[in-house]
Image (cartoon, rainbow, N blue to C red):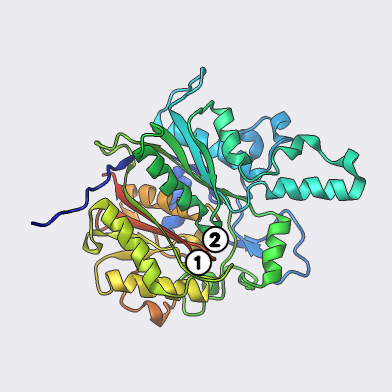
Amino acid sequence: MVTYAAVQPPVSVSGLGVVSAFGTTHAAFVSALLEGRSAVAPIVGFDTEGCRTRIAAQASGFEPTAWISPMKLRRLDRTGVYAVALTRLAFEDGGRAPQPDGDDQSGVVLGTWTAGGQSTQQYLAALFSGGPASAPALLFESTVGNAAASLSGMEFKLRGPNATVSHKEASGLAAIVAGVELLRAGRAVHLIAGGVDAVYETFFKAYDRFKVMSAEPTFCPRVAPFDAERSGFVLGEGGFGLWLHRNGGVVSRHGQILGASAGGAAVPLNTWPDKPDTLARTMNLALEDAGLSAADVDVVYASANATRTLDATEAAALKTLFAGSRTVVTSVKGALGESGASGAASCAAAFLCGRAGWVPPIAGLEAPDPAAAGLNLALARIAVPGPIVLVNSFASGGALFSVVLRVAN
């Protein structure tokens, strides 16, 4: 007699909030991705003279005062504004009515790589230049990493779990995995889960000094995931949130999260995973959690970000599951850059582009690396072959996360 592991209940996705370099509407986000456009451009907002890298995918068209009053803005950094905006957008998309008396059944789980950093930069600059009297007291409360999630909870009176997850580049998907587990455990009925990040001067210049980002002067194939000539990742920013609820019996608006997993690769700090077996194991765990196999997967949103090691390692891992198959493999990081919000951005793209009937191309990919031979890479937009999507997010330092989604018709 064969005993099968119990399949965990799905979690429904009833709203999506998108704050991206392409704008804050679903239509603008989907259109840009399906056209293969990239938001990578020269940095604005601070001087990059003397930097090796001078490009990023910034949300430069985002207007904070459209979401937060000028008086409140004095207390927030950009990640806090992104968190408030994505939450409001997800609620509006999901048709959630305002709760003036607060909501004890709803919470927030956000992932971030940079939250609190911009406020810390501004606070310390004032402190060191003018002493304690010059340090902006109003900004002090935003110098901690959990400020963005807390602000979202306070703004919308969400009194359920409020948590911040930080696993560098994988933070956004890590938060979604954590949110799924909280809902399955009955700790909340509804959650906003996703990621927020911002490109700011100190953070950018620290990574520039490490020489880990692409030194290309503008967007080109050398900043495209899986391209043979790729030369390193480009930073991105924005906020992407999923309005989740645990009543997964019916596919809700955008679809469902069927499975989730977390793993780890034994690599040094700041080093990309270099052995495909740990990545393949994490993907298989998510599939097992969903009660599915690799043959059921229609689309993969890869973690590939144009770094030499990560892309090659993930390609090798994907080939163990999908080599020669119909499964389409894409990545949004040629369009949006790399950030702690990128895994959540991949989920948003999977639902929104999937509901539009398409898989977006890998922006800028011209000559695929031979290491990816055998994978069905999206060189142009492709009609979706089916509703099951695997999303990966793998961080430097070895944090690994995968989720399995079912996109609604």
- Which quadrant does the C terminus fall into? top left
- When the figure is inspected, residue 233 is found, relative to residue 88, above or below; the finding is below
The circle drawn on residue 252 is none
Q: What secondary structure is marked by label 1?
A: loop
Give coordinates of residue 146: x percent, y percent: 61, 42
Q: Do the residues labelled 1 and 2 touch (CB within 8 Å)?
A: yes
How dense is the environment of label 1, judged by Cα within 10 Å: few (below 14), some, or many (20 and up)? many
Mark closest to the chain's N terminus, 1 or 2 = 1
Give coordinates of residue 373: x percent, y percent: 34, 79
Let me know if residue 23 appears in the view.
Answer: no
The residue singled out by tag 1 in the image is: 305
The residue singled out by tag 2 in the image is: 338
Q: Residue furthest top?
A: 101
Give coordinates of residue 300: x percent, y percent: 34, 61
Q: As rendered, which of 349 and 321 lies closer to the eye? A: 321
Q: What secondary structure is marked by label 2?
A: loop
What residue appears at the point 60 percent right and 61 percent down from the top-left corner?
235
- Type of amino acid at the residue the image marks with label 2: Glu
What residue appears at the point 54 percent right and 66 percent down from the top-left corner?
396
Let me know if residue 123 appears in the view.
Answer: yes
- Which quadrant does the N terminus fall into? bottom left
The image quarter in which residue 391 lies: bottom left
Q: Residue furthest bottom?
A: 370
Residue 35 lies left or right of residue 355; in this view the side is right
- Report the Cα–Cα distance between label 1 and label 2: 7 Å
- When the figure is inspected, residue 76 is found, relative to residue 378, above or below; the finding is above
